[in-house]
Image (cartoon, helix red, strand yellow):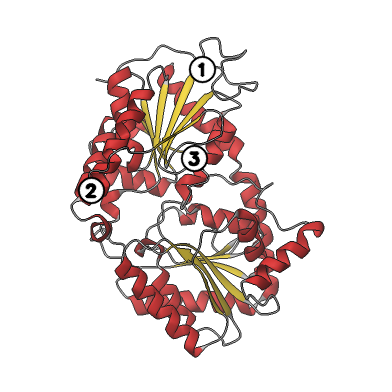
Amino acid sequence: MRPVYGRMLIVGGALPSGEAGEGYPEGVRVDLLTREYPPHVYGGAGVHVFELATVLRNRVDVRVRCFDGTRDEPGVEGYTLGTATGDAALDVLALNLPIARDCAGADIVHSHTWYANGAGHLASLLGGAPHVLTAHSLEPLRPWKADQLGGGYRVSSWIERTAYESAAGVIAVSAGMRDDVLRVYPFVDPDTVRVVHNGIDVEKWRPPLPEEREAANAVVRGYGIDPSRPAVVFIGRVTRQKGLPYLLKAVERLPDDVQVVLCAGAPDTPEFGAEVSATVASLQERRTGVIWIEKMLPRNEVIAILDACTVMACPSVYEPLGIVNLEAMALGLPVVATATGGIPEVVVDGVTGTLVPIDQANDGTGTPVDAERFAADLADALEHMLADSQKASRMGEAGRERATRDFSWDAIADRTVAVYEALLA
């Protein structure tokens, strides 16, 4: 039986991180636990935590605890493992221990991804604070990680399962993610799992202003992108779940004047990285305008690239939501994406983009049953979008409106605080 927490959370006013203020008579404190936090961000979860922490600071006392060493930001504590064990998964578990210890005094511990789920679980056991975790992805639905972690994949899966089955509350980033949680972890109480979508800051993610245009154009030219040619852009890690090989197959079917801009790095394994590299090299030999940017880009450069392209491609075979689609929509870009996971909760087919149907294997990999058909359908959807500039522009405008209306971070913060309130009531 879960403990009952008798605290009241009052929302309103502003509260600097690490301080109690008026409107918070009991000094309600939330510790956010995460692997990723700026400047060390490589995926959507890191973006989510940073933006969530920013807006939560106007509502509660926030402490962020993250990996990869110290930070200068007030209220943010970064941790570094003193002595490595020689195993990546065990190193994560070891780093979770001081994080759990330092959560003493928190009213809520809120963890993100398996990397920090163990710390949240242990902190709850130690201090009695309810543990909330946000489901960004699920280890059992990413079996290819066994190639990356070896036996460590069983360790990461054990940490995640233990945390989910013991958590006081689970936040799923989409209704599709909620369904996955309850299917993969049937012992989780459905009443504890709520949907709170990812958000987007449309003030930060917007087309360049007139005074920013020259610098944006310089970024685009610097990467060899020709703004006079149509362009498909992909942004994501080089991992099987992002479906990059299917996009590369689709590109072979596109007209020769179409550019493809791949902002893709951090391969899961050297072998998969080599596979993608060979495919890209082959494409570059046969057509112009295949541009691969492997490094992590600052936001201003991502914005410049998105603004110069025609359509965003999201060929993921596993995607609980897809912040990258929200970023593209906020820039006024139509999205062609797989109809899987939480993507249909963001991309409205025929309104803000095109959803590509996919028949997927039921073995947990999400692999298309007919890979050639999926690549062909993806190419067809991209070609139709590229061929009708008026439709693409109309869908881009609708996407910007939808991102602004339905996915603001203030709304996401209010929904997150409602989860906290329910546990502390």
The amino acid marked with disc number 3 is: Val
- Percent across and percent down for residue 151 are 18, 52
Residue 4 lies, in percent from the top left, at 34, 15
* Residue at (40, 55) in percent of width and height: 341
Please name which of the two marks, 3 or 2, marks the residue nearer to the observer: 2
26 in relation to 165, above or below: above
Closest to the observer: 92 or 397?
92
Of circles 1 and 2, the one toward us is 2
Q: Callout 1: few (<14), some (14-19), or many (20+) C-alpha neighbours within 10 Å?
A: many
Please provide percent x and percent y for residue 229.
Answer: 66, 80
Residue under label 3: 49
Can you give x and y, in whole percent of width and height, for residue 269 in the image?
A: 31, 63
Residue at mark 1: 9
> How far apart are the alpha carbons under marks 3 and 2?
28 Å
CA gap, disc 1 to disc 2? 43 Å
Tell me whether circle 1 and circle 3 mark residues in contact (CB < 8 Å).
no
Residue type for callout 2: Gly
Q: Secondary structure at mark 1?
A: loop
Q: Which mark is residue 86?
A: 2
66 vs 100, left or right, is right
Q: In the rendered view, would you say 14 is above or below 363?
A: above
Q: Residues within 10 Å of mark 3 (few under 14, many from 20)?
A: many
| Residue 258 in which image quadrant | bottom right
- For the N terminus, give its image quadrant: top left
In front: label 1 or label 3 = 3
